[in-house]
Amino acid sequence: MVNHESARIIQVFDTTLRDGEQSPGCSMTLPEKREVAQRLERLRVDVLEAGFPASSPGDLASVKAIATLIKDCTVAGLCRALEKDIDAAREALAGAVSPRIHIFLATSPIHMEYKLKMSPEQVLERAVAAVRYAKQFCTDVEFSAEDAFRSDRDLVCRVFGEVIAAGATVVNAPDTVGYAMPEEFAGFIRYIKTHTPNMERARLSVHCHNDLGLAVANSLAAIGAGADQVECTVNGIGERAGNASLEEIVMGLRVRKDHFQAETRIDTTKIYPLSRLVSQVTGVKVQPHKAIVGDNAFAHEAGVHQHGVLANRATYEIMTPESVGIPQNRMVLGKHSGRHAFEERLRDLGLSLHDALVEQIFNQFKVLADKKKVVSDRDIEALVMEASASAPETWKLDRWVVNCGSTLSSTSTIRLQHQGGEVAEQAAVGTGPIDAAFKAINRIIGKEPSLNAYELGAVTSGEDAQGQTLVKIGLNSRHWNGRGVSTDVVESSIKAYLAAINAMEWELAASPQP
């Protein structure tokens, strides 16, 4: 058994809001980012990477908002090794209780030759200068050697030693393209630990991508080899095949403390609700067989498995559902349920809301309960997400009508109310009722965003299930998501499209692009 007094504490650096959001279709509105950030804080991550401030005015504004909101963990902003990027991060992190400037520069031969067009000596000089410049404004500076695993090991050690001497408190060795095998990556980390000058003065971090499905395995191998910090995302979202999954790493360390002699500060009971939230706001579904948080992770269908679990859960469960925040004692909610039972269910689901929002969602719950016999956890999550994580309503749905049939052209009349109070109504013809409704909305707002994705599904099973619609729209190379729920699939589609429109209108007004 592990002696907890001697177990190493591995820092968890979450980059869901930066690297995770960079993956196609995973963009979030600022209210959604705030909600995810607060949940990550309650999860007790050590570092929360809020974004890439120099990438756009909108990203700078969102990092600034999160930096002033979060109090109980470090907030990081990513920068290239450029003074203008560091200045943007400095501005964005000015209100943070515990800020970190995170600088990256590639060190692999292919990146230096084709992307940077710099020699190893120039890379070394640029890295040291950037860290030294950032250190003037922030005591906590992390340096990442992009594509470190495919770099010359001695160059990585030399760069790390120099940036530590210049003031870096953390050095990060990423497997940027997910190329490493676990035993190779462990050897690489051991080499860095033993051959880097001044390594005892900084933490060694790893950031693994999942191109070969080995991000978590490589991260855990690195921890076993002496890494002090692991960079990851909720549900493993990220560019290409994604990043190392936070929940898998954390539970791997928890379940196998005997092997790693290491642990994290994460409150694992908040993992599942956070996973559901990230899935909702990004529109990226969690596969049913996903470890830890998938719908089937604790499901047992085979008779021999069911018999074993009934006799002793440890026969087929190496962790309990409760340990990751999946409640087992589920109260049935319906139209006769009261406010107290509803609030208790919100707490069980890890949903912490202010009183006004609870009142709003409770009223929506009562309306839904009149249409359904039983309101499920997923119904409640859908109501909360629709109410709390959406952008301010520039346009509000007042009423809608559609007409369609096998011998009729599909038409729709939509009436919206603008936030200024005026009402606008338009009609349109489309290839179907939903297409017609979307075209009518476009006429009202005076814009024609592209519809990049449209997904319709049921929140739960059964003939009275709510329809849940996800739409993704684009305009001028920018993209927004919207969600809508209703027992009527046409209405859920209209609400989802309008939510995406409101996100677009709000962001364009907040951070116009040239």
Image (cartoon, rainbow, N blue to C red):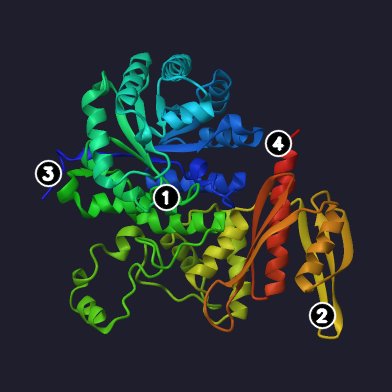
Name the secondary structure under disc 2: strand
Amino acid at the residue labelled 4? Ser
Assess whether mark 1 and mark 4 are in contact (beta carbons under 8 angstroms).
no
In the picture of the structure, the residue carrying the numbered disc 4 is 511
Which one is nearer the viewer's eye here, 510 or 128?
128
Q: CA distance from mark 4 to mark 2?
A: 39 Å
Q: From the viewer's perspective, tell me whether residue 437 is left or right of residue 355.
A: right
Which one is nearer the viewer's eye here, 248 or 191?
191
In the picture of the structure, the residue carrying the numbered disc 3 is 3
Q: From the viewer's perspective, tell me whether residue 315 is left or right of residue 181.
A: left
Residue 339 in percent (x, y) is at 52, 67
| Sequence-first disc among 3 and 2 | 3
| Sequence-first disc among 4 and 1 | 1
Amino acid at the residue labelled 2? Cys
In the picture of the structure, the residue carrying the numbered disc 1 is 211
Q: From the viewer's perspective, tell me whether residue 253 is left or right of residue 446.
A: left
| Sequence-first disc among 4 and 2 | 2
Per the rendering, the mark at residue 424 is none
Q: CA distance from mark 3 to mark 2?
A: 69 Å
Q: Residue at x 43, y 58 (%)?
A: 273
Per the rendering, the mark at residue 404 is 2
Task: Assess disc 2: are there few (<14), some (14-19) or many (≥20) residues with their C-alpha within 10 Å of its C-alpha.
Answer: some
Residue 241 in percent (x, y) is at 46, 52
Name the secondary structure under disc 1: loop
